[in-house]
C-alpha cells in the first residue's frame, strides 16, 4: 500500500511544500529545506499534532496561555474546554495551569506578560 | 524639556529592538509608547510561531514581547515613557502628550517605529450597509484576546492576510462558525503555513477570486452577498450568492502609520518612507524601520531590521555615520512590486535588498546586477507575493544603478 500526500511544513514561516510518500515500512519526505521538515512530515502523516494557544479566565480578565508542546490535533477543542473550566484569581507569566493536559506530555502555561 | 541622543517612537518589536541597538552603540535613548505597556501588537498575537530566527525558539507574541521588554527595562541607557503619544515631529524634536503632560523631547536622531493601521471597510469601498459586526481583523484580535469578548457566532472573513487567517482559527476555537475566507486575488497574501494550520485544519474554505459584493443588515450584520470577480476584480453578477452571517472580519491589508510624519517622502507602493541603506529618510536625522517602513510577514525580521536602524540612528547621533558621496539607486524589473532600500552607498562590504514579488515564481534565480556585472544571485524554489524576500551580496563591485531581475 502506497500513500502520497502533499503538505505545507508548519515548523517555521518558510512553509516548505513537502511531499510525503508512505509505504508499508517506510516514510519518504521530499521538498524540505531542513531536517525539521522530515520530522514534521513523518508525524503529520501518522499522528498530526498542534500547539494550542487560547485564553484563561482570571479575576482581572483573560490571559493568554499555550500548550508547551504540540498535542494531537483531535484534542484541540477538548484542550480549550479544559482551560475554559479554570477560574483563577491571578496568574503569572510562565505559571503551569494544567500539568500533562488530557494525558499528553504537554503542560498548559501562561504566556501573558502584563 | 527632555534631551536625548536617540528618540524611538513606538514600543512594539521594532521600537524595542531599535532602542536596544541604539543603546548598545553608546547612545542615550528615549522610547515613547502610546499604550500602557510595551509590546505593541505582539501582546494580542497570542498564537505561536514567533522568535524562531531571533531567539531560536518558538514563542507566542506575548512571550516574544516579554523577552524584549525585560531587556529594555534592564537597560540603563533607555528611558521608557508609556501612555505617551507623539502629536508632532519637528526638526530633531517631538511634541508629546499623555503621562508626561505636554512635553517636548529633543533628540539628535529620531526613529519611526509606529507600525501600521488596518485598512477599513471604507478604504476598500465595501458595498452595502454599515451595521454592527463589520470589524477589522486586528480589532477582533484585540477584542477577543485582550478584552475577552465574543464578536459573533457566524463569521465570514474577507481577505486572506495573516491576521485574518489567525483569527479564523481563534474564533473557531472560541466556538464561532467561520463559514469561509474570501480572497479577491488568485493567491493568498498570508503565509502558507497559516493557510494549512488555520484553515485546512478546521475545514474552512478559502475562495480565491471571490469577494463580498454587499453587506446586508440594518443594526447588525444579517448576511452578505458574495461571488466571483473577473481579472479586473469586477464582480461577476451571475455568481452572486447570499450567505447568512452576523460578523464580517476584514483582513485586507495594513497601512504604515505615517500621519504624524507625513512631511517625509514616501513610496507609493509601500506607503512607508523612502530610505537609503541606513534606513535613513530624506531628513537625515529621521530613520524608519519595521512595519511603518514596509509591511513585514515576520516579527523576527522586524526586529532584525530595527536593530540595524537603531544602530545607524545611534551612529548619526554621534556624528559617526559615514556615507560615500557615490549614491547608487536601486531599481527592479516588473517582476517585483518593490525593492528596499531605494539607494545604496558605493563602498565595501555586504548589503541587503528586501523585496516582494508581483506573481508566484517557481525554481527561478533572482539576481542583483550593476550594468552587466552580477553582484549576487538567489535561487528561489517557490516564491509568492505574500512573502517578503531578500538578497544579500557584496556591493564592492557596484558603481552605478543596482537592479533586481529574474533570470
Image (tube, coloured by chain):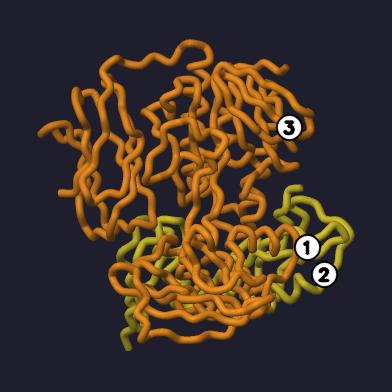
Chain colours: A yellow, B orange
- In the current view of this chain or complex, which residue is farthest to the left? B372
Task: Classify mark 3: residues with Cα within 10 Å, few (<14), some (14-19) or many (20+).
Answer: some
**Badge 1 or badge 2: first in the primary sequence:** 2
Question: Mark 1 sits on what residue?
Answer: A97
Whether tag 1 and tag 2 are in contact, CB under 8 A, the answer is yes
Residue B399, image x and y in percent? Answer: 19, 23
The chain letter for the residue carrying disc 3 is B
* Residue B67: mark: none
Question: Mark 2 sits on what residue?
Answer: A86
In this view, the residue in front, B48 or B305, is B305
Q: In the image, which is nearer the foreground, mark 1 or mark 2?
A: 2
The image shows residue B406, relative to residue B280, as above or below, that is: below
Which quarter of the image is occupied by the N terminus of chain B?
top right
Q: Quadrant of residue A65?
A: bottom right
Residue B250, image x and y in percent? Answer: 54, 65
Label 1 element class: strand
Residue found at x 21% / y 57%: B363
How far apart in space, not on screen, are marks 1 and 2 (Cα)?
Answer: 8 Å
* Residue B97: mark: 3
Amino acid at each position: 500500500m502506497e500513500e502520497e500526500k502533499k503538505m505545507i511544513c508548519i515548523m517555521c514561516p518558510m512553509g516548505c511544500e513537502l511531499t510525503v510518500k508512505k509505504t508499508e515500512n517506510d516514510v519518504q519526505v521530499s521538498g524540505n529545506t531542513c531536517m525539521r521538515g522530515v520530522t514534521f512530515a513523518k508525524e503529520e502523516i501518522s499522528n498530526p499534532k498542534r500547539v494550542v494557544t487560547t485564553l484563561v479566565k482570571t479575576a482581572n480578565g483573560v490571559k493568554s496561555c499555550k500548550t508547551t508542546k504540540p498535542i494531537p490535533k483531535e484534542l484541540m477543542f477538548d484542550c480549550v474546554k479544559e482551560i475554559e473550566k479554570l477560574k483563577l484569581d491571578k496568574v503569572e507569566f510562565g505559571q503551569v495551569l494544567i500539568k500533562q493536559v488530557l494525558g499528553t506530555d504537554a503542560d498548559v502555561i501562561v504566556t501573558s506578560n502584563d | 524639556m527632555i534631551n536625548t541622543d536617540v528618540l524611538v517612537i513606538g514600543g512594539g518589536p521594532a521600537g524595542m529592538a531599535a532602542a536596544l541597538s541604539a543603546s548598545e552603540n553608546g547612545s542615550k535613548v528615549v522610547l515613547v509608547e502610546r499604550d500602557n505597556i510595551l509590546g505593541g501588537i505582539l501582546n494580542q498575537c497570542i498564537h505561536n510561531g514567533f522568535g524562531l530566527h531571533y531567539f531560536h525558539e518558538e514563542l507566542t507574541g506575548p512571550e516574544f514581547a516579554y523577552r524584549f521588554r525585560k531587556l529594555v527595562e534592564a537597560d540603563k541607557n533607555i528611558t521608557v515613557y508609556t501612555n505617551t503619544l507623539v502629536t508632532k515631529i519637528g526638526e530633531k524634536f517631538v511634541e508629546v502628550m499623555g503621562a508626561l503632560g505636554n512635553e517636548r523631547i529633543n533628540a539628535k536622531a529620531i526613529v519611526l517605529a509606529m507600525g501600521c493601521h488596518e485598512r477599513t471597510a471604507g478604504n476598500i469601498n465595501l458595498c452595502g450597509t454599515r451595521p454592527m459586526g463589520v470589524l477589522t481583523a486586528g480589532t477582533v484580535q484585540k477584542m477577543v484576546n485582550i478584552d475577552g469578548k465574543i464578536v459573533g457566532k457566524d463569521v465570514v472573513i474577507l481577505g486572506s492576510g495573516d491576521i485574518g487567517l489567525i483569527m479564523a482559527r481563534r474564533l473557531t476555537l472560541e466556538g464561532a462558525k467561520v463559514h469561509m475566507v474570501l480572497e479577491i486575488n488568485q493567491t493568498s497574501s498570508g503565509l502558507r503555513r497559516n493557510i494549512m494550520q488555520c484553515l485546512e485544519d478546521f475545514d474552512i474554505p478559502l475562495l480565491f477570486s471571490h469577494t463580498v459584493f454587499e453587506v446586508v443588515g440594518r443594526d447588525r450584520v444579517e448576511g452578505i452577498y458574495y461571488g466571483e470577480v473577473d481579472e479586473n476584480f469586477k464582480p461577476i453578477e451571475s455568481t452572486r450568492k447570499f450567505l447568512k452571517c452576523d460578523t464580517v472580519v476584514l483582513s485586507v491589508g495594513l497601512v504604515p502609520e505615517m500621519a504624524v510624519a507625513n512631511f517625509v517622502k514616501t513610496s507609493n507602493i509601500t506607503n512607508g518612507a523612502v530610505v537609503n541603506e541606513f534606513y535613513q529618510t530624506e531628513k537625515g536625522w529621521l530613520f524608519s524601520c519595521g512595519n511603518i517602513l514596509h509591511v513585514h510577514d515576520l516579527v523576527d525580521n522586524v526586529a532584525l531590521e530595527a536593530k540595524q536602524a537603531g544602530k545607524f540612528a545611534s551612529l548619526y547621533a554621534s556624528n559617526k555615520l559615514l556615507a560615500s558621496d557615490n549614491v547608487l539607486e536601486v531599481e527592479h524589473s516588473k517582476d517585483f512590486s518593490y525593492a528596499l532600500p531605494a539607494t545604496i552607498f558605493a563602498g565595501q562590504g555586504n548589503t541587503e535588498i528586501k523585496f516582494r514579488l508581483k506573481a508566484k515564481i517557481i525554481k527561478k534565480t533572482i539576481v542583483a546586477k550593476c550594468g552587466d556585472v552580477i553582484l549576487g544571485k538567489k535561487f528561489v524554489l517557490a516564491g509568492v507575493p505574500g512573502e517578503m524576500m531578500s538578497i544579500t551580496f557584496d556591493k564592492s563591485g557596484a558603481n552605478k544603478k543596482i537592479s533586481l531581475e529574474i533570470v
